[in-house]
Amino acid sequence: MTWGVALTARPDFEITTPGPHVNEFQLKNSPPSYAGVPVDSVRFLAVDDQFARVTIRYQGDDRHKQILTYLEQQFGSLERIPGQMMRGLNQQYTWRGADTEINLTYHANTERGYLFIDSRTLAPRFNDRITDSAE
C-alpha cells in the first residue's frame, strides 16, 4: 500500500478510532497478522486523511524471533556492533529506507513487542497535530 493513500476510500478498512486530524483503522474481517505471524493488533493510521503509519503489537518470544527474522530478510541485517546488547530486557531495532522507517521495540521481561512502520515524510505530521494540552 502506498503512503498517503486515503484509507477512508478503501472498503477493506474500518475506522476504529476517529479524530479531527488523526484516524486509526483496521482491516475488516481479517485476523491480525504480520508476515504470516499472528499478532495482537495491526492498526493503520492516517493524518489528515493520508496513510502515514502502521502500528503492530504482539506478544511472545517465538513471534518476536519470527518477525525479527522477516524484517532482516526484507530490509537487511542489523549491524552487530561489538559490545552491543542484542539480548536484554529492552531491545530496539531500526531500519531506514528512502520513504519508510521501521522501529521495533521488544520488552523481554513481558515478551511484548511493538512495531512501527512510518512514512518518513508524513509521520512527522502527527507531532503537528498534538496540542500543547494533549487533548
Image: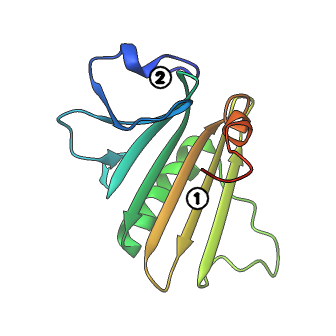
Q: Residue at left 47%, top 66%?
A: 113
Q: Quadrant of residue 84?
A: bottom right
Identify residue for label 2: 1
How many marks on residues?
2
- In the image, is 96 to the left or to the right of 69? right
Q: Residue at left 44%, top 51%?
A: 56
Q: Mark 2 is on which residue type?
A: Met
Q: Is residue 98 above or below residue 2?
A: below
Looking at the image, the residue that sits furthest to the left is 29
Q: Is residue 59 above or below residue 17?
A: below
Looking at the image, the residue that sits furthest to the right is 82
Q: Residues within 10 Å of mark 1 (few under 14, many from 20)?
A: many
Q: Residue at left 75%, top 30%?
A: 98
Identify residue for label 1: 104
Q: Where residue 121 appears, x then y in whole percent?
A: 73, 28
Q: Mark 1 is on which residue type?
A: Leu
Instruction: Name the mark on residue 8.
Output: none
N-terminal-most mark, 1 or 2: 2
